[in-house]
Amino acid sequence: MPERRVIILGSTGSIGTQTLDVIARLNQHSPRFRVVGLASGSNAPLLLEQAERFHVPHLALASGHPSLPAHALTGPDSALRLVRQVDCDLVVASMVGVAGLPATLAAIELGRDVALANKETLVAAGELVIPAAGRSGSHLLPIDSEHAGVWQCLASAWGLGAPPCATPAGVSRVTLTASGGPFRTWDKARIHAATPDMALRHPTWSMGRKVTIDCASLMNKALELIEAHWLFGVGADRLHAVIHPQSLVHAMVEYADGSTLVQLAPADMRCPIQLAITWPQRAAGPVKPLDPASLSGLQFEAIDADRFPAISLAYRVIRAGGTSGAVLNAANEEAVQHFLATPSMPFGRITEVVSDALDTVPQGPLRSIEDFERADALARALVRARLGLPARAVAAVP
Ligand code: MG
């Protein structure tokens, strides 16, 4: 395999640091991956440590820092400028939130392959991003266990192709699994009143704080259903989610002839990370494969839409299209951010205000980044008003 030059956006976060670990391991035998650029939001010490360890020539830091080298890019658009200025083969998009959208979209427009961990890119702007990938030939390689699972289950129909693409006619159902999070067995009133500490105790996955909260509300699964819709061209009628507390089966694809292909792997993000960066090849894995003899206790159960209303919001967004995904995502980001900072805010308010935003904020077609920005700002303003927070002058993204 020829050398691949890689830029990592969000290199100091959970996915970014694990991506660097996977690259270090893959390079032990033959140095195939060269990290040519790293972008971080505000963690200058770790960014500098990574740059030294991987001999990275180009750096971007949104917040700026006195100890950065003079040629480092700084400011809120530094990741976007890094993508535009530095030639590469693969961009790992692992920034948190819609802050990652402009740089990810630029990478796609430049025809780079994008290993996509930033689900907000597709949720909020799928109607822009997918046509852009179609024009440039960019592959969107999912760094998300469920989408990596769907991708592998569909591979028998597609050979070694990569998303985005249309789900073949012979596929009757695409199912994502959800661990159920820490509140899987809780009743509705107890879930509603839960605190950040309770919501941050995820039973199977170790992740960043925002996505951990999203897992507790199943909003993460809602975002993933919308993401799967865009990545695999599958409509709401063929898209499902099911609770699977062990997080070993990540996805299932049911074919019209009655066969269902299931993808299993340890609950370790380094598996989908490695598949995305080594595609179309596979390499020796970072984790011990599952022993079939240990799989006797796998459980599956239907999602209770009454206790976890986020799921029905996903189907609503998939059917409505346009800017509805931007509204859902912005409302959720704003509500989660406030929940994490405010122990007195009940957990159930998050989904309530997101639903309220979908009811209230005007929605329409998504034809430009400006359409996205307008919907995003209106949703954030509405949520802040509902939560009794002062309005912000700019629709700031953390
Ligand atoms: Mg996932």
Image (tube, grey):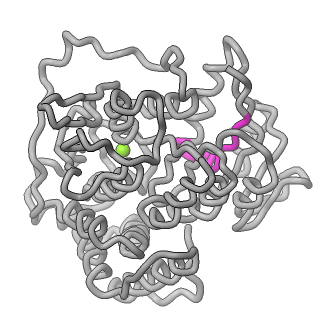
Residue at horizontal 58 percent and vertical 89 percent from the top:
393
131 vs 372: above or below: above
Q: Is residue 99 above or below residue 72?
A: below
* Residue 100 located within the stretch drawn in magenta: no
- Quadrant hosting residue 101: bottom right
The reply to whether residue 67 is visible in this rendering is: no
256 and 386: which is toward the camera: 256
The residue at the point 88 percent across, 50 percent down is 69
Horizontally, is 376 left or right of 214 in the view? Answer: right
Q: Which residue is farthest front?
A: 169
* Left/right of residue 200 with respect to residue 54 in the rendered view: left
Q: How many marks?
A: 0
For image coordinates 46% across by 48% down, the residue present is: 164
Q: Is residue 6 visible?
A: yes
Viewer-side residue, 311 vs 394: 311
x then y, percent, for residue 356: 26, 81
* Residue at point 19%, 36% (across, down): 254
Q: Nearer the viewer, residue 134 or 306?
A: 134
165 sits to left or right of 115: left
Q: Quadrant of residue 299?
A: top left
Q: Quadrant of the C terminus?
A: bottom right
- Please state the horizontal and vertical placement of residue 217, each as a whole percent of the image: 25, 58
* Quadrant in the picture for residue 326: bottom left
Looking at the image, in which quadrant does ligand 1 appear? top left
- Quadrant assignment for the N terminus: top right
Horizontal and vertical percent position of residue 239? 23, 51
- In this view, which residue lies farthest toward the right? 70
Q: Is residue 7 magenta?
A: yes
Q: Please provide the residue range marked out in magenta.
A: 5-15
